[in-house]
Image (cartoon, rainbow, N blue to C red):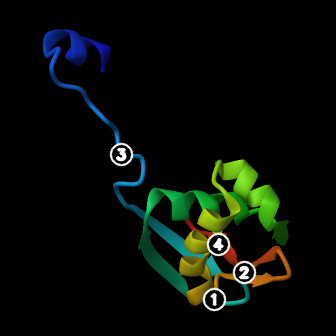
Amino acid sequence: MENYSQQSSYRGLNFQKQIGSVKLEIEINGSSKVETVQCSPVQAAIACYCQDKDSIPLKQLAKAIGLEMSQVQKRISFWISRGILKQSKGTIRVNLKFCR
């Protein structure tokens, strides 16, 4: 990025961390059903962080992925709507296992 700024002093690059998509294959616990899900990198980070845990305090998840709790609330709704995560009283319960 510095080289670009030196070559084009009147221009700069601004990286957008939220742009892109990730494809995950997940298995819902207690089921042999494998689901392929396309999601944002932040949503994938939430799923990856949760995969080895039974439950996680929302504060711990927010700190681990570097977002404010309000942002985590918005992002976990994607997984809650699919039945993969469940939220109750500031704790997230996990119902998933990664296949690949």
Question: Which tag, 3 or 4, sits closer to the chain's start?
Answer: 3
Can you give x and y, in whole percent of width and height, for residue 5 in the image?
23, 16
Crowd band around label 2 with a 10 angstrom C-alpha radius: few (<14), some (14–19), many (20+) = many
Crowd band around label 1 with a 10 angstrom C-alpha radius: few (<14), some (14–19), many (20+) = few
Question: Which tag, 2 or 1, sits closer to the chain's start?
Answer: 1
Crowd band around label 3 with a 10 angstrom C-alpha radius: few (<14), some (14–19), many (20+) = few
In this view, the residue farthest toward the front is 10
Point out the image quarter for the N terminus.
top left
- Residue with the mark numbered 4: 73
2 and 4 marks in contact (CB < 8 Å): no
Q: For the residue labelled by badge 4, is the local secondary structure a helix, a strand or a loop?
A: helix
1 and 4 marks in contact (CB < 8 Å): no
Can you give x and y, in whole percent of width and height, for residue 82 in the image?
56, 87
Number of dots carrying numbers:
4
2 and 1 marks in contact (CB < 8 Å): yes
Q: Which mark is residue 95?
A: 2
In this view, the mark in front (1 or 4) = 4
- Residue with the mark numbered 1: 83
Q: For the residue labelled by badge 1, is the local secondary structure a helix, a strand or a loop?
A: loop
The residue under label 4 is which amino acid type? Gln
- Residue with the mark numbered 3: 16
The residue under label 2 is which amino acid type? Asn
Q: CA distance from mark 2 to mark 1?
A: 7 Å
Position of 16 compared to 43: left or right?
Answer: left
Identify the residue shown where x is 31% and y is 35%: 14
Q: For the residue labelled by badge 2, is the local secondary structure a helix, a strand or a loop?
A: loop
3 and 1 marks in contact (CB < 8 Å): no
